[in-house]
Image (cartoon, rainbow, N blue to C red):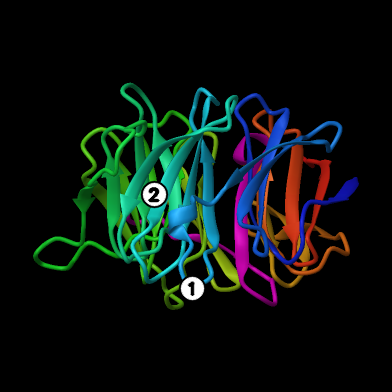
């Protein structure tokens, strides 16, 4: 286990680069995302919030995501008010802002790159799913809006998660999770939370057949292609779950919560296997290295902890 200081205040976001050797962090008192060498913990670069996103209101970085090739880093800003960029893309090597994508009064909750060419970006704003057809556009861009539809039956979109093969992705919002076709951006499956709304994270297992959806202190494991299959429920955290991931080929689920614990669970039975308390405060984010061997979590004291994943 390795712990180091990455900023002040709560670490809100973590993401591994596709190479697995770099880690980006966002602390809520910083006005930038920081890129680190995951092996040496040396800071490599900073990616600041664009200046015209800073108004009389305090901007907050709310989301980060690497492109599949690792060349680009997307950032979302959750500032409401003003008219600055709410989503933007940096080139990692040059540290240059290459795309100030979205200007609106809505804050961005999550971002993710669509697989394939040309490079496209998805973003959510707690209500709508937004798609930027050119993620590298040098000028302000108007997204294609995949909203709730005229019948208002498509659930609100908040958190994003892609399946391993990139063919589908999930949004989790109030009070339902939705599986979308990544090619057509049409909703395929909808699952309502049985215990009330929560904009918690979602994650697919390695097979792409099971979706883990967090809402409140619990996580549902949903075999979404079988509408009759009951969810396996992971229950035991005392405060909301803010990170979900799969280990050991999907047989083990790992969760991180603001109760300060990371827990592993049997995916088939929902029984708790292990529990860790790293002493870095409440946990609001976690990430897996691409090889699945290392995990990282961020605490509310500005620290990040790395540890070996348990299968």
* Image spot of residue 280 (x, y percent): 84, 63
Please tell me how many numbered marks the rendered image carries. 2
Residue 42 falls within the magenta-colored stretch: no
Residue at image x 48%, y 31%?
Answer: 67
Quadrant in which the C terminus appears: top right
* Image spot of residue 132 (x, y percent): 29, 40
Q: In the rendered structure, which segment of residues is drawn in magenta?
A: 225-250
Question: Disc 2 and disc 1: Cα gap in Å?
Answer: 31 Å
Element class at badge 1: loop
Q: Residues within 10 Å of mark 2 (few under 14, many from 20)?
A: many
Quadrant hosting residue 300 = bottom right
Front one among 235 and 227:
235
Element class at badge 2: strand
- Residue 253, visible in the rendered structure: no
Above or below: residue 140 compared with residue 196: above
Residue identified by numbered label 1 = 57
Q: In the displayed structure, does residue 142 sit left or right of residue 201?
A: left
- Residue 5, visible in the rendered structure: yes
Residue at image x 48%, y 73%?
Answer: 56
Q: Residues within 10 Å of mark 1 (few under 14, many from 20)?
A: few
* Image spot of residue 168 (x, y percent): 35, 38
Residue identified by numbered label 2 = 170
Quadrant hosting residue 93 = top right
Residue at image x 62%, y 32%?
Answer: 17
Front one among 295 and 3:
3
Quadrant in which the N terminus appears: top right
* Image spot of residue 287 (x, y percent): 66, 45
Is the Cβ of the residue at disc 2 closer than 8 Å to that at disc 1?
no
């Amino acid at each position: 286990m390795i712990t180091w200081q990455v900023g002040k205040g709560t670490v809100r976001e973590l993401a591994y680069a596709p190479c697995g050797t770099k880690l980006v962090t966002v602390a809520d008192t910083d006005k930038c995302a920081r890129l680190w060498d995951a092996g040496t913990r040396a800071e490599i670069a900073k990616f600041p919030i664009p200046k015209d996103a800073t108004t009389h209101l305090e901007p907050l970085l709310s989301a980060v995501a690497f492109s599949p090739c690792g060349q680009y880093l997307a950032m979302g800003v959750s500032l409401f008010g003003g008219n600055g960029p709410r989503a933007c893309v940096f080139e990692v090597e040059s540290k240059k802002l290459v795309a100030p994508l979205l200007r609106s009064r809505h804050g961005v909750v999550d971002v993710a790159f669509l697989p394939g060419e040309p490079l496209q970006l998805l973003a959510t704003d707690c209500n709508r799913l937004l798609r930027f057809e050119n993620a590298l556009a040098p000028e302000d861009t108007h997204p294609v809006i995949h909203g709730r539809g005229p019948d208002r039956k498509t659930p609100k979109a908040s958190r994003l998660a892609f399946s391993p093969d990139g063919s589908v992705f999930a949004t989790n919002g109030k009070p339902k999770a939705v599986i979308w076709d990544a090619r057509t951006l049409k909703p395929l499956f909808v699952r309502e939370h049985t215990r009330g709304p929560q904009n918690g994270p979602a994650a697919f297992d390695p097979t792409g057949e099971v979706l883990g959806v967090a809402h409140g202190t619990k996580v549902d494991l949903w075999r979404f292609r079988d509408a009759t299959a009951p969810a396996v429920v992971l229950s035991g955290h005392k405060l909301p779950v803010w990170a979900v991931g799969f280990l050991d080929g999907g047989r083990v689920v790992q969760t991180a919560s603001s109760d300060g614990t990371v827990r592993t669970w049997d995916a088939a039975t929902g029984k708790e296997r292990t529990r860790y308390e790293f002493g870095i405060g409440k946990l609001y984010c976690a990430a897996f290295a691409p090889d699945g061997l290392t995990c990282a979590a961020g605490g509310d004291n500005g620290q990040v902890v790395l540890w070996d994943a348990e299968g």
